[in-house]
Amino acid sequence: MSAKIGVITFPGTLDDVDALRAVRLAGAEPVNLWHADEDLRGVDAVVVPGGFSYGDYLRTGAISALAPVMQSVIEAAGKGMPVLGICNGFQILTEARLLPGALTRNQGLHFHCVDTHLEVVNTDTAWTSTLEQGQKILVPAKHGEGRFQAEPDTIKMLEEEGRVVFRYTDNFNGSINDIAGITNETGRVVGLMPHPEHAIETLTGPSVDGLELFLSAIGTIAA
C-alpha cells in the first residue's frame, strides 16, 4: 500500500490543492483533512499548507493553531508522525509550539514573491533525506511575514543542535542567520517559508527540486 499523506484545509488556505498534487506526483496517496475535524483519517504524515488562514487575524497562524485538527496533529507529532509546515503552515507550527521561534513582518515591510535558492543544511530529517547537504534548491517564496525571529538562546540552540534545515542565499526577508526552515528535536517536524509544492514540475514551477521533500517523506514512512 502507498503512503498516505494528509493536507489540511483551513478557511483562507490557498495552497492545499497544490500540496495534494505534489503528494500525488511523488507517488503517495493524498488525503484531504478539514480544520474542524479531529480525525486524521489514518494518514502517515501531514502537510500544513500555505495561505492566509483566518485572514491572518491576531497573528499569522494563531487561530489555526487552535483548530481541532491541529490538536490531533500535535498528538501525532509527539508520537513521531512526520509533519511539514509550508509558509502559513510554518507559522501555524510555531504558534502550536511544535517548532520554536516566530515569523514576523519582512524587513522593509514588503510582501515578496520571488524564486529563491535555498541551501540545504540538514538532510537528517523526515523531509530532506533525499537531498544533499550544501545542495542549492530553487523554489518560489511568497510572503509578507516570513522573517524568522527567536531569542538568542533559541538561535544558539538551533545552530548547535543542527536544527536549521534550510538557509536563504539571498535572505530577502531579513531572517536571523538566513534561516528559511527549521526542524524539531526529532527531525520529524519541519517548517519552511518557501513553497516546495510549487516546484514539482517545470511546466508550473522554476524547478522540480521541491518534489524531493515529498519523496523524502515517503521514504521515511516506508522505513
Image (cartoon, helix red, strand yellow):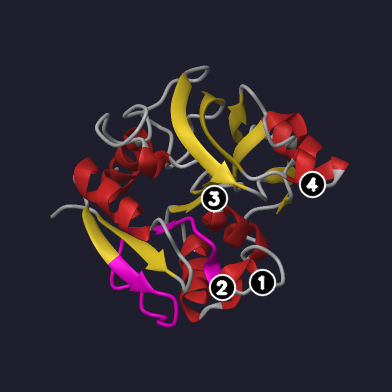
Quadrant of the image for the N terminus? bottom left
- Magenta region: 32-54
Query: Outermost residue toward the left?
Result: 1
User: Left or right of 56: which side holds 17?
Assistant: left
Which residue bears the numbered disc 2? 54
Q: Could you tell me the amino acid type at mark 1?
A: Tyr
Q: Which mark is residue 57?
A: 1
> Reading the chain from its start, which is encountered first: label 4 or label 2?
2
**Mark with earlier residue (1, 3):** 1
The mark closer to the camera, 4 or 2, is 2
Total number of numbered discs in the rendering: 4
At horizontal 48% and vertical 55% (from top left) the residue drawn is 50
Secondary element under disc 2, as helix, strand or loop, is helix
Q: Is residue 49 magenta?
A: yes
First in sequence: mark 4 vs mark 3:
3
Q: In front: 193, or 100?
A: 193
Residue at the spot of label 3: 87
Q: CA distance from mark 4 to mark 2?
A: 24 Å
State which quadrant residue 56 falls in: bottom right
- State the separation of the CA atoms marked 1 and 3: 16 Å
